[in-house]
Amino acid sequence: MKNPLPTLKTSRIILREIIETDLENIYKGLSDPEVIKYYGISFDSPQATKEQMTWFAEPSQYWWAICSPDNKTFFGAGGLNNLSKEHRKAEIGLWLLPGFWGQGIMREAMPLICAYGFQQLKLHRIEGFVETDNRNCKKAMAKLDFKHEGTRRNCEVKNGKLISIDIFAKLKGPVIKSNI
């Protein structure tokens, strides 16, 4: 069992632990065609979305609700998942409701999530896996100092079609060179 997540803040947003009353907003996001276009999962009912709520609570997931500073407006969710303590790495993910796209929320939330991963979870590497066609997300990753490491071509099937995935990563501290 993991400890409760701390609330993380900037002047424009808060990241707080996801709670049961967020179910409707999580469903709203993960059933929206624009949100799920490049997201790995979707749900067709609030009842089905409970599966995602269970996943958020798992020990290897560190996900927050992204909200306005007064906690009255839910913008989306973001966090770290697939945490490997052995390899000191995790995968970052984030989605926003479409009404909040293009407002700089992602650029504020991702550094908070990364700082938590590097400082509190003692990660060395945070990875981002982005569908190759998701140009906006790839631009955002580059602006946030994630380095493009390569593309896994035709590596997954989504909606009956093969898709490629770009791999991005951000490292804590200097890059260790290999002699290989």
Image (tube, helix red, strand yellow):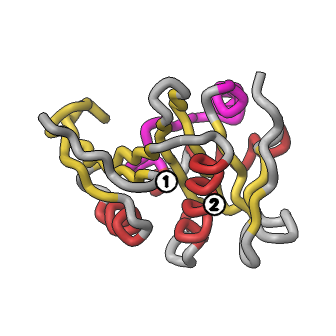
Q: Can you give x and y, in whole percent of width and height, for residue 86 in the image?
A: 50, 24
Please tell me whether mark 2 or mark 1 is closer to you in this view: 2
Q: Which residues are magenta?
A: 36-59
Image: 41 above or below 166: above
Q: Is residue 163 or residue 129 the one in the foreground?
A: 129
Q: Which three-letter amino acid code belongs to the residue tagged 1?
A: Val
The residue wearing badge 2 is 112
Q: Can you give x and y, in whole percent of width and height, for residue 118 in the image?
A: 57, 49
- Regarding mark 2 in the picture, which secondary structure is present there? helix
- Taking the spot 39% from the left edge, 71% from the top edge, the residue there is 143
- Residue 78 marker: none
- Taking the spot 64% from the left edge, 50% from the top edge, the residue there is 119
Task: Please indicate whether residue 135 sits to the left or right of residue 48 in the image.
Answer: left
**Residue 115: which quarter of the image?**
bottom right
Mark 2 to mark 1: distance in Å? 22 Å
Task: Please indicate whether residue 88 sits to the left or right of residue 157 in the image.
Answer: right
**Residue 27: which quarter of the image?**
top right
The residue wearing badge 1 is 35
Q: Is residue 72 or residue 151 the one in the foreground?
A: 151
